Image (cartoon, coloured by chain):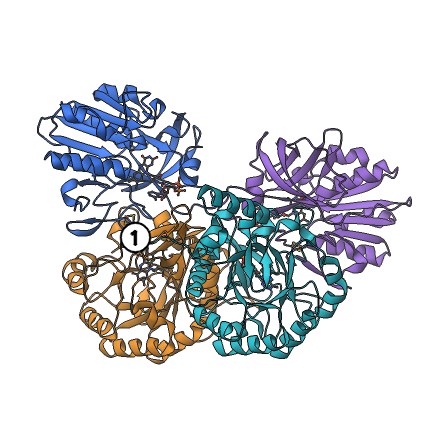
Chain colours: A blue, B purple, C cyan, D orange
Amino acid sequence: MKQLDFTVRSNEKLNDQNHLIKVTPSNHELLPEIFPGQFVQILVDNSPRIFLRRPISVNFVNKEKNEVWLLIQAIGEGTGRICEAVTGDRMNLLFPLGSSFTIPGEKGNYLLVGGGVGTAPLLFLGKMLHDKGVSCDFLLGGRSEKDILQRRDFEKYGTLYCATEDGSFGEKGFVTRHSLLENKRYDFIFTCGPKPMMVAVAKYAHRNGIACEVSLENLMACGFGACLCCIEKTIRGNVCACTEGPVFNLNELTWLD
Amino acid sequence: MKQLDFTVRSNEKLNDQNHLIKVTPSNHELLPEIFPGQFVQILVDNSPRIFLRRPISVNFVNKEKNEVWLLIQAIGEGTGRICEAVTGDRMNLLFPLGSSFTIPGEKGNYLLVGGGVGTAPLLFLGKMLHDKGVSCDFLLGGRSEKDILQRRDFEKYGTLYCATEDGSFGEKGFVTRHSLLENKRYDFIFTCGPKPMMVAVAKYAHRNGIACEVSLENLMACGFGACLCCIEKTIRGNVCACTEGPVFNLNELTWLD
Amino acid sequence: MARLEVQIGDLQLRNPVMTASGTFGYGTEYSDFIDLGRLGGVFVKGTTLEPREGNDYPRMAETPSGMLNSVGLQNKGVDYFVEHLYPVIKDYDTHMIVNVSGSTIEDYVACAAKLAGLDKMPAIELNISCPNVKEGGMAFGTSCASAASVTRAVREVYPKTLIVKLSPNVTDIAEIARSVEAEGADAVSLVNTFLGMAIDVERRKPKLSTITGGLSGPCIKPIALRMVWQVYHAVNIPIIGMGGITNWQDAIEFILAGADAIQIGTYNFVDPAASVKIVDGINDYLDRHHISSVNELVGGMNHF
Amino acid sequence: MARLEVQIGDLQLRNPVMTASGTFGYGTEYSDFIDLGRLGGVFVKGTTLEPREGNDYPRMAETPSGMLNSVGLQNKGVDYFVEHLYPVIKDYDTHMIVNVSGSTIEDYVACAAKLAGLDKMPAIELNISCPNVKEGGMAFGTSCASAASVTRAVREVYPKTLIVKLSPNVTDIAEIARSVEAEGADAVSLVNTFLGMAIDVERRKPKLSTITGGLSGPCIKPIALRMVWQVYHAVNIPIIGMGGITNWQDAIEFILAGADAIQIGTYNFVDPAASVKIVDGINDYLDRHHISSVNELVGGMNHF
Ligand SMILES: Cc1cc2nc3c(=O)[nH]c(=O)nc-3n(C[C@H](O)[C@H](O)[C@H](O)COP(=O)(O)OP(=O)(O)OC[C@H]3O[C@@H](n4cnc5c(N)ncnc54)[C@H](O)[C@@H]3O)c2cc1C
Ligand SMILES: Cc1cc2nc3c(=O)[nH]c(=O)nc-3n(C[C@H](O)[C@H](O)[C@H](O)COP(=O)(O)OP(=O)(O)OC[C@H]3O[C@@H](n4cnc5c(N)ncnc54)[C@H](O)[C@@H]3O)c2cc1C
Ligand SMILES: Cc1cc2nc3c(=O)[nH]c(=O)nc-3n(C[C@H](O)[C@H](O)[C@H](O)COP(=O)(O)O)c2cc1C
Ligand SMILES: Cc1cc2nc3c(=O)[nH]c(=O)nc-3n(C[C@H](O)[C@H](O)[C@H](O)COP(=O)(O)O)c2cc1C
Ligand code: FES
Ligand code: FES
């Protein structure tokens, strides 16, 4: 873990609420190894109502450019301020934090299911799987077409399937009702998104005996194991979602009890 | 008194610490009558450490342009943030607040003494005196040449005398030691600046039997008479510096007791 | 907007939004900024039997999300109030309530008795919690026995709505609330300011002339809210909640914790129109949640 | 930097800057961010006789300039500490001090006795002020009698430096401080968190699973500072001050109010390197003011 100032290289507004922000260490030092599923804690300056940092997943790491990508949905004051960043701004980060998705050695069929901005860590994960020589299916959901973000990027690393609530793109309805889940047999599922979606995915995986990892977004104060605020109930008792997670194997969680 | 959003027309950095910010009502309504010596209370957004508004004198009113000028020294976080404003920004003000300098009907010799950013309200006062057909002497002080602000503007309304601590402009030393005070006889003195300077001016005025008004910068929470935090001890007891002042006649104060 | 109406003792309030004593002058100071007629009530500056000059300057210091004050009950005394201020404010289109302060029980009683005679003054708020006076004041609010005795004494001379304002500087505020309820208080209001301090490190001096002063503003909200919730579970009389309220969300939090009405204090300095914005915000919230009367929200947290 | 040294009981601290229990894990969590050897000491997470799972999620809520927590002393128990954690942390180049918590006097005593035997553990901090456990905890810190009895009992089994951590949720903290001093506490530390609450108005539910929780951060600083100042005038043992410290200015404020040393709590989450920055800031301040030892600053406000 490190605390480091980053410089904002670009801030692209992807739709009404979501921004893709690319940052690089201000002192030009090389990024340490970062794994898909890990996150950063961003210091939010200049807000009278925000005291704590905000946890945001690593969306992508561009090694050549020494760049970290952050995909951020401006839903409250903290994310709202972060999304106001302009090129050249400083951003203080703690990183890389937390556990990562397991990249299995074996070949097989991989499905990465994301909802809303929960797709963020899946891009980097897809890239890593692709680099290992396995290509995967992405199943992404959102309210409507404009909420399916980074389509071009995902398509580089696998096959993209989508579901939108209003049917404006891909199948109509929730991802968890997508026909793909009936038609294809997977060996591994990785998922990140709203809790109800992840629970539905987890149930599907469980029912079908598929290995499944989920990425949680528990409320966090520190992000590095010091406060014990972010706990998740597991079969081993309460553990910190920021250090033992955010990525958990479904088997460890008590969701389906 | 009003609460109104203003739009920043311009923000000019006059030296390392001081900014001249020109604002106009965002809804284009005409400014009410504002008198020299009155002030505004500026809402400071986006600072986690600032809760209360910041009181700033009206530096000038440009009626044709429906513009208020604010001359602000960035000494702490609040003024620092205000000085970051860029053209087009909104600024919420309570205004006009407080008492004003008395513009006497009579002719006579007027001296306006200001130190540092305390010169702010004197420009507007000089203009008003000039409009009444009396021209006045300005005696402005600062650490060095670059701290004597708005010289061109002052010169429009009277004769400018200066003192700098390092002697880089005008006489060397404090304004209160300026030769002008020995050489010319005044009927009215108006002053604003650091307390020690104002006390020295007050003593001079008292010693020489000259009518004198001073403008105070007491700590304020509300600025409009509701909190009773800004009190000044007067011969009538504790009074609010924000409603009965900031401009007081020296005779009312207990400074020289 | 009938559904915003609330009842505190004999007072029928237009809505639950009032303004806190010492932060709203005599209402007059705000009449350029808002229509006072939109408020449930206005609590005027702490009034004492004799005139008081208050404490020396400096009297305030800004703190993270709040401020310290040590005004110290500067006011011209109850007689001046009756003769000069009452005639001006009595016709305002809202309830004007005097905050009564003192150093001895006799002071409180004498002051309350003088106010009892004023036709258009339907209530007083007994300030047994001011941290900014050397004697009395807060001391009355920090033990059950003294809180009870001052309430009992005032109750005897004051037949109209009697609101007792509690100090948060105590181990168990619920116990104090119960003791004033037992003596016939019609309602309690809470909280007054927390005793706090700030030091200018470069000059190595306290920032307030009195060393310590009263802390108010958003910083105290979580503690104030907890106290309202505790008192709600301890008494049956109405509760007026306050402490750091800046917007309608804060106001709803207090109501859900158990407050029948609320007061806006320090935030009036930042936004003199905050109180009326909060009235509108509560109204919209009720609409959105299909709640027919604000009274239904009082203490109305969902089970979990 | 000899002039930064301070003495707390038998402890000789390199400097007055320590980190607060429950906010700094076992030090290990911060070793990537700072050199622990630069700190005066580290207070590790509250440790109880038996392992505890702590409270349910959610355990935290952000508030204006602060946060609420209801962790509830989650820890693996003192035996686990002795066997698995102590061996790891005992060689850190700073004082590692265990914060001892419990629900009964017997718990405290048994826990303290087990820690007394550890060579490299020169001190314990007795947490009689945790608001986040159902029984005991804070209750011990809110009356003189119970504060005294738990201190007395632990004093009998614990010969090394005994620091008692006080609750701010009391009417008169100076009185509690005096009562633990009388029972042989070597130092007091204050303050623990304030009992507070926050409500999610849209869901109409408390934000914490436990309804109320402990408030910490800059919001509490003015009250904590006042309490340190009051305790400074009440006892002769050293004081460790805390509550909302974020920078060297805050630290100097506490020292001027009477603290011999300070702890940084919640702000470590925001800036894990805050503590070492504060060490440097205090050093610079002493230089600038030509003060030869930090001890000269303790309670050193100028007269006015
Ligand atoms: C490990 C992790 C990875 C995340 N990755 C992303 C990401 O890549 N992109 C993205 O847009 N969002 C991500 N989030 C969620 C993001 O942290 C929250 O949306 C953000 O903290 C909300 O802050 P706010 O001030 O904008 O909103 P607030 O007004 O504070 O709250 C809005 C909502 O966000 C929740 N929230 C507030 N603080 C936190 C917190 N510290 N942790 C979690 N939720 C919180 C609140 O409960 C509330 O429901 C992630 C969260 C976690 C824990
Ligand atoms: C009636 C009046 C008119 C003023 N006119 C001007 C002006 O035209 N231009 C200008 O640059 N400054 C003016 N000031 C001073 C200005 O208000 C302060 O410099 C400003 O409030 C400091 O805020 P800060 O956050 O930048 O600094 P802080 O970090 O808050 O404080 C820096 C210094 O400013 C003092 N200060 C802080 N708050 C206030 C306050 N509310 N009132 C007065 N002093 C305070 C502090 O005691 C400290 O010494 C005026 C003050 C008053 C009362
Ligand atoms: C400047 C100031 C003066 C106050 N004067 C009084 C007073 O005279 N009587 C009183 O009962 N409370 C007084 N209070 C306390 C407020 O009425 C209120 O209880 C407290 O500020 C908490 O609410 P807030 O956080 O919304 O300000 C005063 C508060 C401030 C800030
Ligand atoms: C998440 C969290 C956990 C805490 N756990 C403990 C604890 O186990 N024992 C204890 O004595 N204090 C505990 N505290 C209180 C702190 O040690 C400290 O007293 C308090 O937070 C005030 O300081 P601060 O404002 O600098 O955080 C905890 C505080 C927080 C925020
Ligand atoms: S967020 Fe602090 S331990 Fe996980
Ligand atoms: S600043 Fe509030 S009364 Fe003057």
**Which residue is under mark 1?**
A227
Ligand 5 is within 8 Å of the C-beta of the residue at disc 1:
yes
Whether residue B163 is visible, yes or no, is no
Q: On the rendered structure, is D169 left or right of B154?
A: left
Three-letter residue code for mark 1: Cys
* Residue A190 higher or lower than D270, as above or below: above
The residue located at (67%, 55%) in the rendering is C27
Q: On the rendered structure, is D187 left or right of C77?
A: left
The residue located at (69%, 62%) in the rendering is C120
* Residue A120 higher or lower than C202, as above or below: above
Q: Which of B13 and C241 is in front in this view?
A: C241
Disc 1 chain ID: A
Q: On the rendered structure, is A242 left or right of C173?
A: left
> Which secondary structure, mark 1?
loop
Image quadrant holding the C terminus of chain D, namely: bottom right
**Residue A12, horizontal then vertical, whole percent:** 39, 25
